[in-house]
Image: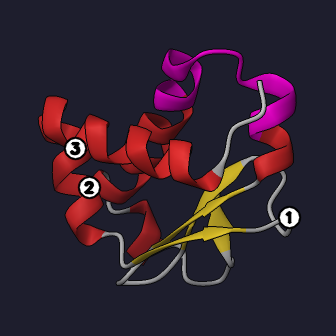
Amino acid sequence: MKWTEKQIRYIIQDMAEENPLACKALFKVTDIEFTEKVPTMAVSLSSKPVLKINRAFCKNFLLTENDVKTVLLHEFLHVLMLHTGKMQDQQSVT
């Protein structure tokens, strides 16, 4: 499916409203960056993490909205488990 930035942002907003874990993690994410610099999705390793999303990965491998939500939740769990602040020697965690 061809996911647009707008669609993915809408899914993130929808997740925040329906999922308390996603909501809590989203409050800690400072920005959402659409980039080809990560192979899939990732969060930067910093005290104020940035969610990085590869549109080509979404288009080629995520077929449904639930697929997108699953990968996003995986990234949000990195934030909630404080992986983003502990692994400063790397640039991001996928």
**Other-residue count near label 3 (Cα within 10 Å), few / some / many at <14 / 14–19 / ≥20:** some
Range of magenta residues: 58-70
* Left or right side of 7 for 40: right
Front residue (pair 12, 5): 5
CA separation in Å, label 2 and label 3: 9 Å
Element type at marker 2? Answer: helix
Under mark 3, the amino acid is: Ala
Query: Sequence order check: which comes first, mark 2 or mark 1?
Result: 2
Q: Which residue is mark 1?
A: 36
Query: Sequence order check: which comes first, mark 3 or mark 1?
Result: 3
Q: Is residue 77 visible?
A: no
Q: Residue at x 45, y 69 (%)?
A: 84
Residue 90, quarter of picture: bottom right
Under mark 2, the amino acid is: Ala
Q: Which residue is mark 2?
A: 25
Q: Which residue is mark 3?
A: 16
CA separation in Å, label 2 and label 1: 23 Å
Under mark 1, the amino acid is: Glu
Q: Residue at x 16, y 53 (%)?
A: 24
Q: Residue at x 61, y 54 (%)?
A: 5
**Other-residue count near label 2 (Cα within 10 Å), few / some / many at <14 / 14–19 / ≥20:** many
Residue 69 counted in the magenta span: yes
Question: Which colouring convention does the figure follow?
Answer: secondary structure
